Amino acid sequence: MSDTGSTGLTIGAVAELTGVPAPTLRAWERRYGIPSPARSASGHRLYHADHVALVRRLRRLVDAGVAPRMAVERLRNAPPAPRHPPAPPDDDPYAVVVGRIVDAIDRFDPDTLESELRRVLVLGSTTAIYERVMVPVMRLLGERWSHDDPLSIAQEHLTTEVMRNVAQDLHRLARPESPLGSAVVACVADEQHVLPLYAIAFRLAQRRIRAVVLGARTPPPVVAVAVERLRPDMVALSATVRPADPEALLSAYGHSCGSTPWIIGGTGLRGWAEQVRAHGGHAIGPDLHLDAFVDGLALTG
Ligand code: B12
């Protein structure tokens, strides 16, 4: 619960998670001083998991007929609510959740898998959840996966599906309220590994860039249409597996993006940075360091 990153949740996300409308959240803050989120450099409210828990408790009291001022008083005098799942103070909450998720995968228990992943939503920032829960789970899954073991294939399919749903929800919640720019994010043709797309979208959201995620297998003509219709400030492409003909693919994406800056990353194009640049793109390898690229964009707002 400690790491909420530099972004936190927006007021819209907290409204969605708690059912308390944004104007009410602002009014409670103005009148009673709670919750009192930090502000981003641009003045937007940034809420943590603790704020969400507080708002939920406040709402329960108000729904039960307690006047907001009295409810606030009660919460100020009450001991903090126990967190669920309860974690000893020294434990890493992310590791605890990873353990529970892996357990649910082992038992092939879709309901627990789903509920454990949903619980993660209030643990911290989107990037922290992604990097400290989703990626470790997927990597563990990769280590255990075997093409001649139907159970491991079923576990992988189930987990990927639930992960993608949760990633989509996180993406929706993290969407910047007043974006500085926009991006089209897609897998290259024939590429099916979609989770990196959300990792990119979360990073871009931190920079207040709104990402349109086009998903798996997005061939160059499809990217060209998206660029023409959406006029994004950038395009980000992901290749986890080495494409059959990288040179031809890079050339085609170079044409599809035209003058729109594009970046391509993932393990599939390791060692191809020079060719990416030759076709007008920016190569990034398997890491997520998008800042230098974003710094170079002329954002349109
Ligand atoms: C789930 C999974 C699948 C699912 C994908 C479902 C889905 N909808 O996503 C399915 C079953 C479809 C699948 C299929 C295959 N898979 Co698979 N799969 C996995 C698994 C278990 C998890 C993938 C995942 O989500 N990882 C988590 C992601 C987020 O981590 P990441 O890949 O490291 O991505 C990071 C960076 O690369 C970066 N990044 C990526 N792109 C970009 C782009 C930009 C611009 C930026 C800035 C950053 C960036 O972002 C991420 C940051 O966290 C991995 C195991 C693993 N270790 O990852 C294997 C794995 C990726 N698969 C692998 C393979 C070989 C395959 C198949 C070829 C298997 C087969 N013989 O059929 C097919 C290929 C399908 C295709 N053409 O795409 C290999 C890839 C090895 C390689 N690089 O060549 C892996 C590593 C397993 C292994 N150890 O062999 N797979």
Image (cartoon, rainbow, N blue to C red):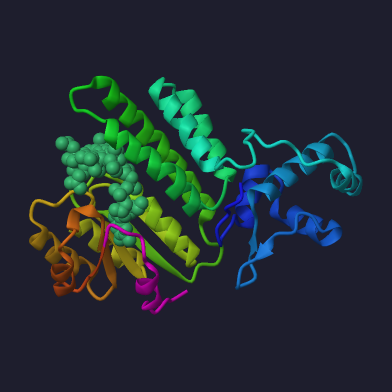
* Residue 300 is a magenta residue: yes
Q: Is residue 146 left or right of residue 121?
A: left
Residue 215 visible in the picture:
no
- Does the rendering let one see residue 141? yes
Q: How many marks?
A: 0
Image location of residue 281, percent across then percent down: 22, 70
What residue is at 91 percent from the left and 45 percent from the top?
A: 70
User: Would you place residue 264 above or below residue 80 in this image?
Assistant: below
Secondary structure predominantly adopted by residues drawn in magenta: loop
Q: Position of residue 247 (x, y in %)?
A: 9, 62
Q: Is residue 157 left or right of residue 188?
A: right
Ligand 1's image quarter is top left
Query: In the rendered view, does 198 fall on the left or right side of 225?
Result: right
222 drawn magenta: no
Vertical arrangement, residue 93 with respect to residue 231, above or below: above
Q: Magenta segment range?
A: 285-301
Nearer-the-camera pick, 236 or 203: 203
Q: Residue 28: give x, y in percent of width and height.
A: 80, 55
Of 178 and 208, the residue lying toward us? 208
Q: Is residue 265 above or below residue 101?
A: below
Residue at 22%, 22% (x, y): give it: 149
Residue 219 drawn above or below residue 193: below
